[in-house]
Each structure stands twice: as C-alpha cells, then as structure tokens.
Amino acid sequence: MNFDFSDDQKALKDQARKFLADKSSAKAVRGVLEKADVSFDAALWKGVAELGWLGVAIPEEHGGLGLGRLELCVLAEEMGRACAPIPFASSLYFFAEAVMLAGTDAQKAAVLPKVADGSVIGCFAVSEGPGAASAASLSCSFEGGTLSGVKTPVTDGDCATHAVVVAREGAGVSLVLVDLAQPGVTRETLKTLDPSRGHAKLTFDKVKAERLGAVGEGWVQAEQVLDRAAVLLAFEQIGGSQACLDMAVDYAKNRFAFSRQIGSFQAIKHKLADMYVALEVARSNAFYGAWALSTDAAELPLAAAAARVAGIEAYHLASKENIQTHGGMGFTWDVDCHLFYRRAKLLAVQAGALPVWKEKLVSRLERRNAA
C-alpha cells in the first residue's frame, strides 16, 4: 500500500516550495513582523490567490479547483516551512471548512468563490479569554438574527473580512456567519509572540449575522472543524520542523570549533537525532490524519488528535534545538531561528493547546477501545 503523495501532488509541492522560497523569504517574513501597521503580506496573498491555492479544496461549483484536501495538506506543509505571513490557515483550514461543513447551498455560493479568489479573508472565533473554551463557557450570544459578545484572541481577526463565530443560541450552541465590515463590530489588535500572524479582540454589538446549520448543532460542528484544522496544522508544523532541522544540520556542518565541525560532537549529534525522530513521528501521524481527512473516515477524530499532539511536540523540540545548535548567536534577532520558534508557539495554541488535545486523544482512544 502506498502512503506517499501522488506525482501530481509532489509537483504541486515543488512548485509551492519554489514560489514561497522566492516570495516568502525570511526577509519578507521579517517585513511583516517588524511593522506594527502591517498584519500580513498583501503581495504574497495576491500571488497565492492567482496561483489558485486558496481554492484547492473548494468544489468547482463554488469557484474552487476542487482538487481535494490532500493537496491542501501539501500546501500547508510548505506554508509551515516558509513561515508564510498570510491568513492562509484561518481562511482555509477553519473558515472555509466551517462554511463547507455547515452552510446552505446559498451560503456556500455567496462566500466560497470569494474565499477562492482571495477577496474574502476568513477567521474562526471560538475563544473568549484564558482557558479552554467549552459549550458551557460561551457567553457570546446569537438571538433574533443578531450577534452580541466578545471573542478573544481571534487569529487573523485584525485583517479578516468575515468570521464564523461559535455562539450560544437559546439553550444550545450555533455557528454564525458574520460580515466584519458592518457597524457594531469593534476590533482591537492584540500583541502576541508572533507578530507575523495578526490577532484581535472582536466585540459584537447586536450585529447582523446568519446561522450556519441547524440550531443547537454548533458545538458538534465546531469540534468537526477543529479536527479538520488539526490535521492541516500538523502539516504546517512538520514543514516548520523540517526547516528547523535543515537549518540546524547545515549550521552543524559549516560551523567549526576546536578545528572540527560541531556536528561531529556527540552533544550536537544527539540533538539532531532527537529532532529527526520527533519529526518522523509527527510526519507519520500527519499522513494518517491526511488519509482520514481526505476519505472522511470514522477514524478522523482520533487521527486528528494524534497528529495534533505529535505536531506540537515535534515543532517545539525542533525550533528549540535549532536555537541551541546555533549556540550563543541562535537566540539573537539577526539569526532566523526565532522566526520558527515564534511560529511553533503560535501554532501550538491556535486550535487548542497541547493539554486539550492530549485529553482528546486519551478520551477518544478510550471510546474506541470500549467499543
């Protein structure tokens, strides 16, 4: 059985790597990170849209390429390798997936073509402050066609044009589609460890909105969106982990101490070996998740949790040990190691932190074994 990507998918991967190496270099990432008034790379976003990547998993009848989620996994890995400073994940892994999962045909026709051409930037708003969100903890409410409440932090909420908000409706929870350009929406830009990806506090004051899906199904739908996003984020994490490993190996081969390559010292060898092992564990779990995602398999919740846990752990280790391998200069601003460390920290909490996903993994394993 072949668990690798097809030749066409590998060609897409090569194309993406070359394009992002040129358009999303470390200099370009720093250009966003260092400017307080810039929330993402608009030129890169336009280029990605022109290549059709924003519509790779969106059906053709809704303006996309209709290729599939395996192709989206391929692109996600290269986005992670490049630390791309664009709202790719928020728009595609979360927002578009939520609309495709729960939206009506009319809602899909109105929104998805604009996601595919880049004119709509989406975000997914669940959190309302510190701690893991739950159906019982939500205070943001949707009543009579209007939305009120606060969501914070919202990844890419500072640049998004639309949002899917998880809100309380009556005794249940619903997913709600909101146009963020209308009156009653207030945004407050938040400072984070990784300024190359924007975050915001969104306040809604009786804002017009429309429900996605049936009343009361929102929390189940939100969990399904998070499972899908977890697999795609895992591919971003293995892309970033691979970039860290490549940087560390290259430096270890070219840096000499005591007339020897530092890579010849056992301490450095062990660091690189540990990075490689963690990366390969994460890669195997990500591939399992990709299979489950692309086939809509019953194993997706379990595969997503495994991919998410392994991806977080691998990227954290790789970004940390990359800095250590570079020695005293590794933590300085001028060396690019911190770009990946920042992104590793951000991705580790974007769809729920590591303890949340470890709990999901354990509980899902228990349910499977009890069946």
Image (spheres, helix red, strand yellow):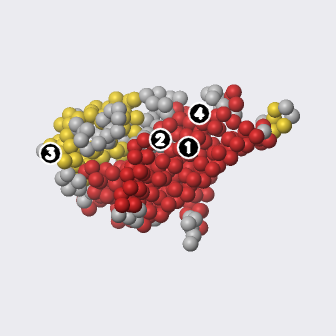
Mark positioned earlier in the residue sequence (1 or 3): 3
Q: Residues within 10 Å of mark 1 (few under 14, many from 20)?
A: many
Tell me which corner region of the image, top left, top right, bottom left or bottom right, holds residue 338. Answer: top right
The reply to whether dot 2 and dot 1 touch (C-beta < 8 Å) is yes
Query: What distance separates the C-alpha of mark 1 from that of mark 3?
Result: 40 Å
Q: Amino acid type of disc 1?
A: Tyr
The reply to whether dot 2 and dot 3 touch (C-beta < 8 Å) is no
List the residue tagged with mark 3: 170
The front one of 132 and 208 is 132
User: Disc 3 vs disc 4: which is toward the camera?
Assistant: 3
**Element at label 1:** helix
Mark positioned earlier in the residue sequence (2 or 1): 1
List the residue tagged with mark 2: 348
Q: Identify the residue shown where x is 36% and y is 61%.
A: 370
List the residue tagged with mark 4: 338
The front one of 292 and 105 is 292
Q: How crowded is mark 4: few (under 14 residues within 10 Å), some or many (20 or more)?
A: some
List the residue tagged with mark 1: 315
